[in-house]
Image: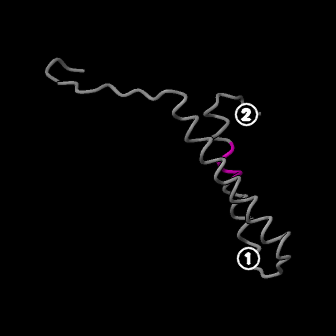
Amino acid sequence: MENNETVFAKWSIDKTQTMFFASAITATFLVLFLASFYFIFLWQRSTNLILLVVPIIFFLLLVAALPEFFKSIGAPII
């Protein structure tokens, strides 16, 4: 940083801030997947192909969010 720069604020990201957002996003995808799986597969016993894709998409979003969740809590990924 040069001497003629004015610093108004210094930002720092705490680990708890990233853990909250990662856990909130992961929990949201988990709830959406479980709810869609229950209502479409188990409750309605649907055979409509378009409806069957919805839980699969939520499952893929959940699988994509899990590594970022584990990175945010600092757990080693195998």
CA–CA distance between discs 2 and 1?
33 Å
Q: Which residue is mark 1?
A: 51
Q: Which residue is mark 2?
A: 77
Above or below 8: residue 61: below
Label 1: which secondary element: helix
Q: Position of residue 41 (x, y in %)?
A: 83, 70
Residue drawn where x is 17% and y is 17% of the image: 3
Please say whether residue 6 is one of the residues in the magenta stretch: no
Crowding at mark 2 (Cα within 10 Å: few <14, some 14-19, many 20+):
few
Residue drawn where x is 82% and y is 76% of the image: 44
Kind of residue sitting beneath label 1:
Leu
Q: Earlier in the sequence, mark 2 or mark 1?
A: 1
Q: Nearer the viewer, residue 43 or 14?
A: 43
Q: Position of residue 54 (x, y in %)?
A: 70, 69
Q: Which residues are magenta?
A: 62-66
Above or below 35: residue 52: below
SS assignment for the magenta stretch, majority = helix
Q: Quadrant of residue 74?
A: top right
